[in-house]
Image (tube, rainbow, N blue to C red):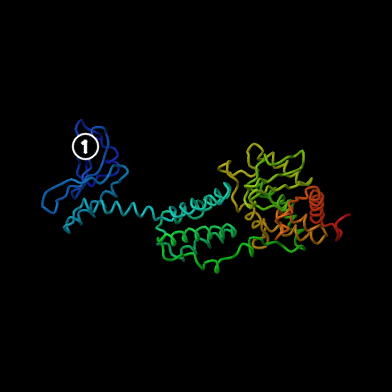
Amino acid sequence: MKRTEIKRRPLSDTTLNGLEADAKEYRELDGNGLYFRVKPDGSKSWQLRYKTPTGKWSWLGLGGYPEVSGAMARQRATELRDDAAEGKNPITTKLARKAAEAAAATRTFETLAREWHTSRRASWDEGTAKRIIGALEKHVFPTFGARQFETIQPIEWMELLRGMERQGILEQMSRVRSYCQDAYDLARVTGRATHNPLEGLSKYLQTSKAENYAHVPLDELPPLLRAMRAYSGAKDVQIGLCLLSLLAVRPSELREAHWEEFDFSKSLWTIPEHRKGRKRGREHLVPLSQQAIKLLEELRTLSGAYPLLFPGRSDHTKPRSDTVFLMALRRLGYEGRQTGHGFRHIASTIMNEHGWPADHIEAQLSHKPQGVRGIYNKAQYLEQRRAMMQWYADHLDQLAAGNVVPLRRPA
């Protein structure tokens, strides 16, 4: 657009974007002393013509276009004209505002949280550090990342965390609350905050143990197994539910599993030490029953072309949502009664009631024994657990079929 074609002022966004350069630099009035400058090389910027306290006219740059939009330039021009009318030097006030904006940028919650993350990074393994910052990026930064951390009120934090409660991700909610509370502690001990708005919130939030580990009584297990096996939603999710019931692993371990971790010739799944929930320096060996192998082979026809067993729909490099199995159980009518983690409790109860050794059960659940015994007992009881988990898979088949099973395990 030629400058001669301008029809109205203030200049429209279409005009600002379309103005063409001339052989010489020129300015076009936007209004109230604000001008739009176009240089021969095509670069564009804003300038304010104002009268200094001594009564002389001068120019003040307000920033380049399109970084500074028309609306932003007009707002800045208004502030600076008001300053000049009050006898202040617009150059000085402009610099002061710029410094204040730069200082404010360092006081956002995202800046604080990333500083806290960096300060703790040396104490975490790579997987833990990645999961923590990922949780903040997903659940907190979209809402509070750009906010000044000292302005966020406790009620706002409560609303955010209760939103996670409603999604059913209580364990994640609890961890996110802890991360954010720790970040505020850093601000407090470094003199940037006088209080922690997350203190005391845990009293009024659900605990992951109460809800996230919910599981049905054993007399309701058979209909649940049948419902899962008849699940009409996504096939990979149906297989995932069945695998959770068979393997007694953490839902995150299964959801984030990679095909390279499975050795079908040995019927063995090796969960690496960096997987969520793992203790540092401890990988976990999971023996696979015949039923689990069959399900995995079926799943491989669906997702075997990807590294992950359960690749996300929009991004195959990331696993499915951390609520995928919980949502499936809700669709089956088990909201608040059964969760993915709850299958671990069911497995523990059944195997204990049928006389399997506690050490073998705890090893299958990847629980570390307490006290001195936990320090010295490094056994994984792999072969014993192979027999136990095959028995358990057969037992679940019998329950689903409605057959009577013996109280004690076979010799």
Q: Which is more toward the observer, 173 or 273?
A: 273
Q: Residue at x 48, y 62 (%)?
A: 157
**Disc 1 on helix, strand or loop?**
helix
| Rendering coords of residue 85 (x, y %) | 16, 57
Q: Which is more toward the observer, 317 or 360?
A: 360
Can you name the residue that lies furthest to the left here? Answer: 55
| Rendering coords of residue 128 (x, y %) | 57, 50
Total labels: the figure holds 1
69 over 223 or under it: above or below:
above
- Horizontal relation, residue 323 to residue 87: left or right: right
Q: Which is more toward the observer, 144 or 397?
A: 144
Residue 305 visible = yes
| Rendering coords of residue 325 (x, y %) | 64, 53
- The residue wearing badge 1 is 3
Q: Which is more toward the observer, 342 or 324?
A: 342
Residue 229 visible = no
Could you classify mark 1 by the number of other residues whose Cα lies within 10 Å: few (under 14), some (14-19), or many (20 or more)?
some
Quarter of the figure that contains the C terminus: bottom right
Quarter of the figure that contains the N terminus: top left
Can you name the residue that lies furthest to the top here? Answer: 23
- Horizontal relation, residue 13 to residue 22: left or right: right
- Splitting the image into 4 quarters, where does residue 297 fall? top right
| Rendering coords of residue 364 (x, y %) | 74, 53
Q: Disc 1 residue type?
A: Arg
- Splitting the image into 4 quarters, where does residue 88 fall? bottom left
380 over 203 or under it: above or below:
above
